[in-house]
Image (cartoon, rainbow, N blue to C red):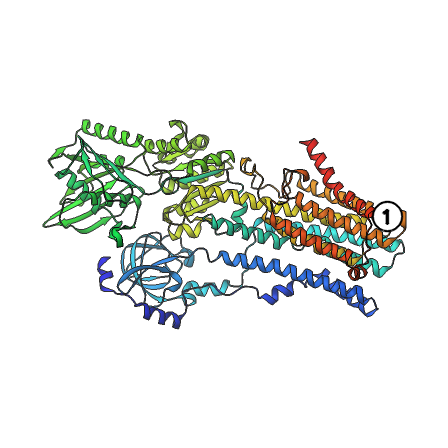
Amino acid sequence: MESIIVKNKGLSEDEANKRIDKFGLNDININNKKKVYNILLDQFKDILIIILAISTAISFLLGEWLDAIVIFIIIIINGILGFIQEFRAEKAIESLQSYISYKAKVIRNGKVVDIDTKFLTIGDIVIVEEGDRIPADGELLQAKSLSVDESLLTGESVPVMKSNYDDNKVYMGTYVVSGKGVFKVTSVGLSTKMGSIARMISEIEQEKTPLQQRLNQFGKWLALICLSVCFLIVILGILRHQDIYEMFMIGISLSVAAIPEGLPAVVTITLAIGVQRMVKKNALIRKLSSVETLGCVDIICTDKTGTLTENKMTVKKIETVSKMIEVEGNGYDVRGRILQDGKIIKNELLDNIVLCSKLCNNATFEVKKEFGNKTNYIVKGDPTEIALLVFSYKYSERLGDFERIDEIPFDSDKKYMAVYCKHNSEYYLFVKGALENLLEKCSFYMDSNGEIKELSLYSKKIILEKNAMLCNNAMRVLCLCMKKNSKVIDDLIFLGLVGMIDPPKRGVKVAIERAKKAGIKTIMITGDHKLTAYAIGKDLGIANSFEEVAEGNIFENDEADYDKYIDKFNIFARVSPKHKLKIVRTLKKKNHIVAMTGDGVNDAPAIKESDIGISMGLSGTDVTKNVASMVLLDDNYSTIISAVEEGRIIYNNIRKFIKYLLACNIGEVFTMFLASLLFLPLPLLPMQILWVNLVTDGLPAAALSVCRPDEDLMEKKPRKKDESIFADRLMGKIIVRGILIGITTLISFYLPYKNTNNIELSRTCAFATLVISQLIYAFECTSERRGIFEINIFSNIYLFFAILISLALFLAVILIPSLGIIFNTYRLTRIEWIIVLACATTPSIFNYLIEKDVG
């Protein structure tokens, strides 16, 4: 691999930019966005709006020009508000696409650099390895054990072996399953195979979330019911010999107001804005449907290293057969002594331990001195290997130059890595890995003087005891071995055990406790030894006893056994990726909603199988990011809990504005329906109905989508995945409130009408009661637990100002004489205002008293 990098300087930046200008960006996103004017026109395509517009035009021709103009203006304003909502939803969804970008390792100007894949161009030299997504079409220049998953293009699930001689083509969008390769880019963007597929599917609409689909279906039924009731109101009015044209206008206006056409847009905005908030908390949601599922998660299966811990390993102890060696220092700082019995130590055994640490290693570590003697550490690779390099830097002895001849990469089944090196005329095999996999392959050990001795059963017992001691101190342990002049992994020479610490991340323990209170169980999954895993798990509050720890090999037994007792385990140690998949399947079989984290290519099946697949953003491969529902931008467990909380908030806020919209719309329809049943004059005119809809359904409903959560939100158990959005008596509450609003509105109409017989005054009272009761109810909907007298009206500042604006628009048509003429409103006296306020507040007071008694 190194030789290809030396021979190929790659493109210069200037040449690359020229080619990007010529061939375009390496991007297959086809502009399939709705045009702005189409979004605006869509607001006026609704059949009810069209009928209302035609009817209003007819009334204009018949001389009712003032009413016609006002209704047209209201239709336009409603359309503009609908446009703003849908445009915001489009923009919010669009912005989510830009949060995650894939990187490619490219040779430019003779140096290996990481760039966004969209800036790749024809002629670029690209390096790929296990877990990488192929960023463009190309021809291989070199391949080492390279196999590629091309199922996305071919449908074949078996990885394809590649070489620079036979099958030397690689294609954008496929994944490296194993090995390494270097290829030259031949096609980019829409010219690639993937680009041609993208052209064919570009017209496919974005899939709606299950919640959006359910609400769309519900909306159709609601529209049918509302239209039926409105039709009945019209028929009743005609039977009472009321003006047919007036009743027709009332029916259409009421239908327009009653059907919550803005509901899908507000749901989309709420989901998209919530996802943007999650990004600010380092959780990138790749699928909107995952937001709904987050609130249902009751088990989080999380990796230990990097998610629960800092992922900054530090070598602290080395145990040989006869000695214990201490290593000073923390993190990447190369300052620190290597001590035995308090004295700096150097001997042949330690020479070989350092060589094994340094050579059996694919990480890079560079120390740079900057201005003012500031030290900067440039690191790349696995944290365990970086820790070994830092350790080797602390050993100042010059050990000679070794040339790597061959490598056996780490494998999750073998659990070891080996390199074959040449020094002078001798060959050396260095091996590092899990003790339980390597100890059985060791026949000898090296003492402090470099003498090779036979490894007896007694010596093996000592090694196992030392391993247990390191593990009990929450250390990750690696076994280091070597062999001369042979590549066979057998009859190895045991060198020593390296003990490393990886401290828990700040805030993780608190987050785990929060998860417990929220009814979410945390399961730690690690490749570490059982004792190490328990020590860390106990410290973090994941496990209380050693009986809660299991090893991954239990999943290699009969499935019926572990299916029965999997719920009792909180920690799984020595786990391989195939074990992860079985853990997920078993938990799902027991009706748990499972979130699973992962970073490697072999973790992809388990991540895809889980309800919420979570990829690491910093250490995760392209494969895991692509199949995941969520990407942790900071690789932190605490971020998962923040995302779960945000998912619950979003879902609850959707319930809040549904509760508000439907209750208000039912109140409007019930007011008119009840008046018809009681043979009363119409309590509202078409213009007034449309104005009520304008001032109450727009801004307040949208503002409810950004409510703060109730304090006990993360102290409730997760909701069931199939739970209705109307669970917890929500539909009953909506209907009761709608009926109450309708009754009190009609009362505020009837009392003035009975005493004064002034129909304009009475309608103004009904109009005012309907608006004010709905605006009060908006504040009430900010909490599912608190009544109107316990709510802080400033808790949602957006709602506060939305209601102020709505109130101003409502008062304008009453207090401004010219608008009063247009809307047929009447200036109210103190007595009428008392009636209005009494009737408008009655539903909230009634609800508060009922809920208090129930509570």
Query: Disc 1 on helix, strand or loop?
Result: helix
Does 690 sit above or below residue 308?
below
Q: Which residue is mark 1?
A: 752
Does 404 sit above or below residue 437?
below
Quarter the C terminus occupies: top right
Does 227 sit above or below residue 30?
above
For this rendering, which residue is in front, 83 or 345? 345
Callout 1 crowding tier (Cα within 10 Å): few <14, some 14–19, many ≥20: many
Quarter the N terminus occupies: bottom left
Left or right of 444: which side holds 184? Answer: right
Does 81 sit above or below residue 213?
below
**Residue beneath the point at 69% across and 64% down:** 76
Kindly indicate the quadrant of the structure image that contains residue 713: top right
Kindly indicate the quadrant of the structure image that contains residue 510: top left
Confirm whether residue 259 shows in the render: no
Image spot of residue 234 (x, y percent): 82, 55
- Residue projecting furthest to the left: 425
Left or right of 566: which side holds 384? Answer: left
**Residue beneath the point at 82% across and 66% down:** 64
For this rendering, which residue is in front, 745 or 621? 745
Image spot of residue 724 (x, y percent): 62, 42
Left or right of 591: which side holds 768? Answer: right
Kindly indicate the quadrant of the structure image that contains residue 194: bottom left
**Residue beneath the point at 20% across and 42% down:** 489
For this rendering, which residue is in front, 314 or 522? 314
In the image, what residue type sits under mark 1?
Pro
